Amino acid sequence: MLKLRLAYIGALLLLSSTNLAAQAEPPKAWLMPPKDLWAFSYQYLDLESNVTPSNDVVLANGTINAFVNAPSIVRTFSVGDRIAQVFIVPTFGNLTASVEIEDIPGFGEIDIDPVEFVDKTGMMDSQVNFRMGLHNAPALNIIELAQWERKFQIYGFFGVTLPTGEYDSGRRVNLGANRWAFRIGAPMVLPLNQNKKRPADLEFHPQFVFYTNNNDPFVGDTKKQKPLLRLNAAATKQFTSRFYASLGAGFQYGAVTRIDDLPEGERLEQLGAGITGGYTFASIITVQATLGQIFFNDRNGFMARFQATVVLPSKSDRELIKQAADAQGD
């Protein structure tokens, strides 16, 4: 029994909150992990939509293809008696698009080439994220978590997107946005059963994103951007101690840009949905893959995501696991 529960804990430790599209966040991103863990995760995304990964350019027509690599380092710890996590997510990849000036509302009538082809590879804007338990989210070691009676949980989330991406004010579309973004959210987890072998959970994450100004835009002096509302949800079922599947959906609305006194840009309004399958190896390595669609401007985009995570329990947790296994064998 203990071995099965520990395998399940390995399956939930995806520990990723990177959100680069309206397509839902990775499932199991918000399930409660044990304290005192290090985790290393790699996420690859293939996105086709009408917005850059930094959400600074939204096309009225046309598409942007993004190929994103997002490795992350995660540490779980306790704040008082509550679980907490820090995520550090550097991001790099490729953007390709054929951008017509009339596809980017807000530039006004300016005398430039009507079409620009974008094919750029390099660093994108990176993220540092933090979450802490607010309700029914205690800081437990790996054995205590395996025995814990799951309850409805609420977390506080705060994230910062740093302007680490490559940026050239002579280009209409860039890998980076040349401004900061701040994200505030309240992830929630609702257990759908109390089956420790085959748990099912519903995750929901409302989030607001606020942007600073870009003071070196493609045209004009200052590019401002209104806040963005994000809603993400995922329903996940553990079918064996190692295999799970999930249905997810996400919605983004807002993030309208304006340069000086020019007309406002296009509103970001996207709906995404996808299906995910995941599998855990040796209790500490989890892989998952997602296929989905993104709906925008009466068009359908595409998203494929792959993620692999390695979890490293603390020395004390390894000793607890060994003691529990020895006790179970006696």
Image (cartoon, rainbow, N blue to C red):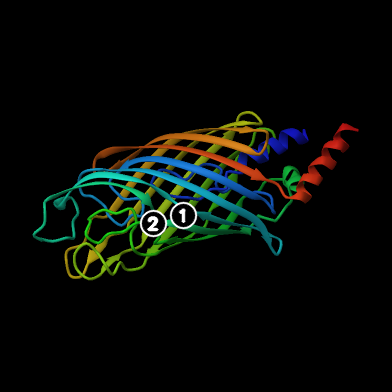
Q: Residues within 10 Å of mark 1 (few under 14, many from 20)?
A: some
| In the image, residue 95 above or below residue 237 | below
Percent of width and height locating residue 234? 50, 42
Circles 2 and 1, Cβ within 8 Å, touching? The answer is yes
| Residue 229: mark in rendering | 2
| In the image, residue 104 above or below residue 222 | above
Look at mark 1 in the image and give the residue it sits on: 206
Q: Residue at x 67, y 46 (%)?
A: 312
Of residues 96 and 225, the one nearer the viewer is 96
On-image quarter of the C terminus: top right
Q: Could you say whether the residue bearing mark 1 is in a helix, strand or loop?
A: strand
Give the amino acid type for the residue marked by disc 1 in the picture: Pro
Of residues 9 and 271, the one nearer the viewer is 9
Q: Residues within 10 Å of mark 2 (few under 14, many from 20)?
A: some
Percent of width and height locating residue 33? 65, 48
| Residue 143: mark in rendering | none
Q: Earlier in the sequence, mark 2 or mark 1?
A: 1
Query: How many numbered callouts?
Result: 2
